[in-house]
Amino acid sequence: MFKFLGAPYPIATTPKGYLPSISGVDTIKADLLQLLLTYPGSRVMLPAFGTRLKDLIFEPNDIILRDRARDMIIDAISQWEPRIAVEAIEVSSNVENDFLSNEDDYSEREHILGISILFKDPQNITTIQELVLEVPLQNYNLL
């Protein structure tokens, strides 16, 4: 059986300066992060690769924004990530306090879009894996 090897995302070096490699579900999670955080047009040889999540940064954090983000994620995964079976994609606002830094005063909770993707790794279909991502949104105040 072929074993996928990849690099962690974001790319970091080991204490000795080498590039580490990852395998299994860690590779899939790193690839999903790259897919979600890459803006279409950034890759010359794959101009359609990525999502337009960055376009949502200045939008109000409401149900329309959450639906748009979820649709973008579904479209990108269905086109670019055939290795996984998605169980659920949840996009929410007002992330839980435990996701934020201890130094945060929690006043920015409503300006963070929480994304949770539950999926099954084809190598282990009995276990559901989760990828969590928080996307900061601009503080949107109407005058």
Image (spheres, rainbow, N blue to C red):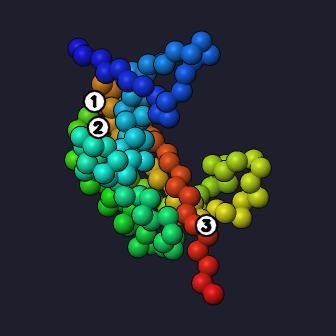
Q: Which residue is mark 1?
A: 122
SS class, disc 2:
loop
The amino acid type, in three-letter code, at marker 3 is: Glu
Q: Residues within 10 Å of mark 2 (few under 14, many from 20)?
A: some
Tag nearer the camera, 1 or 3 = 3
**Residue shown at 28% from the left, 30% from the top:** 122
| Residue 82 appears left or right of 91 | left
- Image coords of residue 119 (percent x, y): 35, 41
Residue 84's mark? 2
SS class, disc 1:
loop
Residue 77's mark? none
- If you read the primary sequence from the N terminus, does the residue marked by circle 3 or circle 2 appear first? 2
Q: Which residue is mark 3?
A: 110
- Whole-angstrom CA distance, mark 3 to mark 2, is 31 Å
| Residue 75 appears left or right of 93 | left
Q: Residue furthest bottom?
A: 143
Q: Residues within 10 Å of mark 1 (few under 14, many from 20)?
A: some
- Whole-angstrom CA distance, mark 2 to mark 1, is 6 Å
Visible in this render: residue 89?
Answer: yes
- If you read the primary sequence from the N terminus, does the residue marked by circle 2 or circle 1 appear first? 2
The amino acid type, in three-letter code, at marker 1 is: Pro
Q: Is residue 125 above or below residue 139?
A: above
Q: Is residue 13 above or below residue 97?
A: above
Tag nearer the camera, 3 or 2 = 3
**Residue shown at 62% from the left, 79% from the top:** 141
Q: Quadrant of the N terminus?
A: top left
The amino acid type, in three-letter code, at marker 2 is: Ile
